[in-house]
Amino acid sequence: MNHLRSALVIALCAALIALPSSVSASALTTFNVWQWNVSGNKMHHGSTTDGLVSEAVNSILDSDAHLVAFNELCWGQYKALQSALRTAGWPNDSTNYSRFATILGPTAGVCNGNEDYGNAIFSKQPLSPASRFTLPPDGTREQRNLLCAGLLTTPGARFCTTHITTSNALAANGKKNNENQLNFVLDQMEAYRADGQTVVIAGDFNAQPDYGRLNNWYSSSLNTVNNGNNTGHYREMDDNDPTACLGYGAWTANAIPADPSPCAAVEPRSKVDLIFVREDRIAGTYTGNALAIPATCAGIPEGACSDHRIVIGTVPVLIG
């Protein structure tokens, strides 16, 4: 019996040693992701007291969000969100849970006439130092960016946000400005993946899911009448919802695009706010949705707190 027990132990140890390193080293975690383009200057003029901050904080808490991204956020609003989330006890580390990236050019100092304007990320976990990348130019003086930071208590995980230009003009390389920016961001996502990192990116991509410039983002495994011809490796958290528009998802922005979506007969408004994760890092069923725009902000027609909806997603991922 002792010989049999020893043989079994040796066999089990050998089996564990033989497991691929990607299996033995990987850990499974689930992220709840939250993103909102708040139009912090255009609609709110930098205000921190008109209801925007409180609506955002309440939604973050109600969504049990772990990772939070903002686009078009003013510096004062960023500081107010820091304070409100800290007071709510949301971050695990109240000294290290947010990062900001100013959009340089004519938008710098635009909020309240002297405050910066840009993208921001917040994390329930403490964050590593931020990486801020300037996107390729779009023919204006505005310098858009990609903002990323690692999660210190989940090594190998990284969270990013970006806000892509709307410019369709051709750049010097013969590609459109928005395409160049999307490709730049995608290249950085792939560089992180090659380094063994699992990345979640949420932001305003200013492109609808069926647009050709997103074909190299969306996974080739996604092929529906609403979103086909894809050649990439990423899934968007709302692309598998059969109750919205399969392969496409729910609308996120009030604007009605000149190039209507395949779902325009049902819903003519735009879907441009997206949450992406590389398909080979997804470890189960993921979900996404867009929430109603809060209508409680003072001094804005009909109280609308933004011209974009809050976008949420839940995704189980492999780390390592």
Image (tube, rainbow, N blue to C red):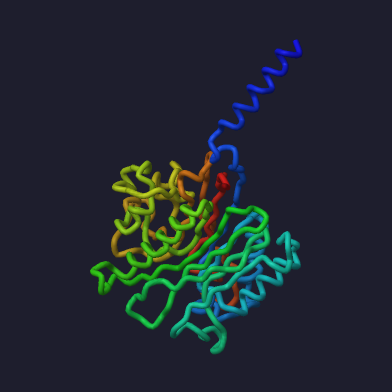
Residue at coordinates 54% horizontally, 68% vertically from top-left? 131
Q: Position of residue 195 (x, y in %)?
A: 50, 54
Whether residue 304 is visible, yes or no, is: no
Residue farthest toward the bottom in the current orientation of the protein: 113
Residue 16: quarter of image: top right
In which quadrant of the rendered image does the N terminus lie?
top right
Residue 127: quarter of image: bottom right
Q: Position of residue 300 (x, y in %)?
A: 54, 76
Please determine whether, in this image, residue 270 is positioned above or below residue 316: below
Q: Position of residue 205 (x, y in %)?
A: 42, 63
Query: Which of 252 and 13 lies nearest the eye of the viewer?
Result: 13
Q: Total label count? A: 0
Please determine whether, in this image, residue 289 is positioned above or below residue 13: below
Query: Which of 132 and 50 lies nearest the eye of the viewer?
Result: 132
Residue at coordinates 36% horizontally, 70% vertically from top-left? 166
User: Relative to residue 48, is residue 230 drawn left or right?
Assistant: left
Residue farthest toward the top in the current orientation of the protein: 1
Residue farthest toward the left in the current orientation of the protein: 174
User: Relative to residue 141, is residue 285 drawn left or right?
Assistant: right
